[in-house]
Image: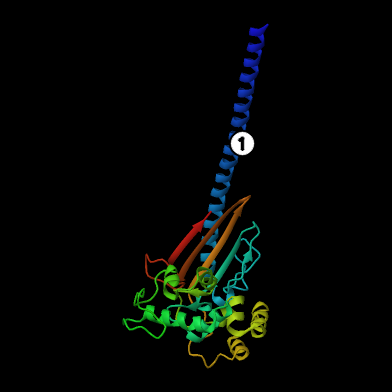
Amino acid sequence: MKPKGIALIQVLIIAACLSVIGIFMSGSAKIKVANAKLAVDKSYAYVNAHSLEAKVTFHLLANSWLELDKRPLLDEKVTLNTYGNPVMLKNGSNVRVQDLTGLLNVNYPSLEMFDRLLKGIGVDFSQRKLVISRLLDWKDIDMIERANGTEKYARNGIMLDRSDIFHAIQLEKDKVSEILPFVTLFSASHFNPALAPKDLLIYLFGQEKATQIIALREAKKGRPIMFGSYLGTYDYDEIAYIPGNVLQIRIVAQYREAIVKSGFTIELFPYEDVKGKAPFNVFEREISW
């Protein structure tokens, strides 16, 4: 009986091993199927993002700034804005368009406005003076350090990449990350508060004035003279209520559970008539899955 008992135990062990292998293979197959499905969904999401890029670019080229809030985006029932408010689309995707004149240009900053931004994100007075001195030393063409500034890491020229901002102002990483949504490298030298994001308006002009401007803007009743009157900004040389032709576009495209984030900065030439020349120029592009 002993050999038979041992044989039975061996059979049971083999059966158990096969069961474990079967369970593992079954689970592995399910994971592979799920991964394959996610890969296909991501491909569709990427196609949706690419399609939206083309659709938004065409819409911006085909419509003037004054027409954007009147003409809906192709195949959609919504209109675009150029002050960074997200626009939800029928397939679950969303688009944000930001005119870069509505952001502060760190290459040609209004020092007063930049100081207000730093104060708004919680940078104290003495540190703000350090940051501005470092920023100016980074850009100027000499090697003479300002009071509290430094030429150690200075490029002696304009910033060419957003990563330069970290090196130029030398603030804590989390503080620089708070600044980044409100600054740009590419726009014209003037700043247009009428197209600034909500939080930037609050930092620069306070909650009360920002609320008035946002209400006018969303009601589509605002005119440059009204914005300037509310904000008291007609004495600022750096401020002009004129839209620009350089736009930052952020797209979040969705297909089932897959999400693709796409972003690019584009300069538009809607009246370009040179044969063979594109009516736009893409400065930077990024995509994440």
Using the image as rendered, state which of residue 235 and residue 281 is in the foreground. 235
Which residue position holds label 1?
A: 30
Looking at the picture, the colour scheme in use is rainbow
Residue at the farthest front position: 2
- The answer to whether residue 145 is left or right of residue 287 is left
At 58% across and 79% down in the image, what residue appears? Answer: 120
Q: Residue at 58% of width from left, 86% of height from top? A: 224
Residue 138 visible? The answer is yes
**In the rendered image, the vertical position of residue 10 relative to residue 196, given as above or below:** above
Which residue, as the protein is rendered here, is positioned at the far top? 1
- How many numbered markers are drawn? 1
Residue 179: percent from the left, percent from the top?
Answer: 53, 73
Residue density around tag 1, few if under 14, some if 14–19, many if 20 or more, within 10 Å: few
Residue 61 visible, this orientation: no
Image height of 179 relative to 16, above or below: below
Question: Disc 1 marks which amino acid?
Answer: Lys
Measuring 59% from the left and 38% from the top, which residue is drawn there?
A: 31
**Residue at the bottom extreme?**
235
Q: Quadrant of residue 5?
A: top right
Q: Quadrant of residue 11?
A: top right
Q: Is residue 34 above or below residue 114?
A: above
Q: Residue 55: horizontal and vertical position, in percent?
A: 54, 62
Query: Where's residue 108, x and y in %?
Result: 43, 81
Residue 53: percent from left, percent from top? 52, 61
- Name the image quarter holding the N terminus: top right
**Depth order, front residue of 9/197:** 9
Residue at disc 1, secondary structure: helix
User: Of 42 and 48, which appears nearest the observer?
Assistant: 42
**Residue at (51, 63) in percent of width and height:** 263
